[in-house]
Amino acid sequence: MTIDQQEVTIYTDGACSGNPGPGGWGAILFFNSNKIEKRICGSESYTTNNKMELMAVIQALKVLKCYSNVQLYTDSIYVKNGITLWIHKWKISGWKTANKLPVKNMDLWLELDKLALLHNINWYWVKAHVGNKYNEEVDMLARNSIYTNIS
């Protein structure tokens, strides 16, 4: 690690009350071997769970102000597989799925791809609701933000 790099661990989650419906997202970021912690969250009045999962990751990466080595944990297979596997095929196919349909949430995928290229990210999927401390905390953050942040 050089002096202008930082080590960051991120947990993200999205939630929706109805799908579509009001939604929230949350992220917890740990900097410098967990000595500094930052929690962020937000909401939208009408959205989908997948959009909120993507927003959580996008907003977490926007917090990073310099090149970072990131360990990113999500319970969304959609996000993990989308950014590590599917996005390469979508770019080649003109943003079409294997069924030749337009990729949903393309605007968010483009933003996530742009942000992800700024960092060295290791992506991890964690099973939800099995007692992972930080996954549970970020789930609560996302769920609580559904109604508290909507203006």
Image (tube, grey):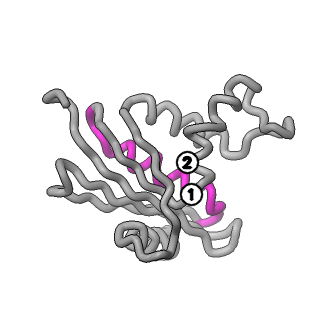
Crowding at dot 1, Cα within 10 Å, few <14 / some 14-19 / many 20+, comes out as many
The structure residue drawn at horizontal position 64% and vertical position 64%, both measured from the top left corner, is 46
Q: 46 or 107, which is in the foreground?
A: 107
Q: 126 or 19, which is in the foreground?
A: 126
- At which x and y percent is residue 76? 56, 57
Q: Which portion, as a residue range, is magenta?
A: 45-66
- SS type, badge 2: helix
The residue to which callout 2 is attached is 80
- At which x and y percent is residue 69? 30, 38
Query: From the viewer's perspective, is 22 left or right of 31?
Result: right
Residue 142 in the image: above or below residue 59: below
* Amino acid type of the residue that numbered disc 2 sits on in the rendered structure: Lys
Query: From the viewer's perspective, is 48 left or right of 62?
Result: right
Where's the N terminus, which quadrant?
A: top left
* Amino acid type of the residue that numbered disc 1 sits on in the rendered structure: Ser
Instruction: State yes or no: residue 80 in magenta.
Output: no
Q: Which mark, residue 133?
A: none
- How many numbered callouts? 2
- At which x and y percent is residue 79? 57, 49
The residue to which callout 1 is attached is 76
Q: Residue 90's image quarter?
A: top right
- SS type, badge 1: loop
Residue 150 in the image: above or below residue 73: below
Q: How far separated are the C-alphas under marks 1 and 2?
A: 6 Å
The structure residue drawn at horizontal position 40% and vertical position 49%, both measured from the top left corner, is 72
Q: Are discs 1 and 2 less than 8 Å apart at CB?
A: yes
Main SS, magenta residues: helix
Query: From the viewer's perspective, is 35 left or right of 18?
Result: left
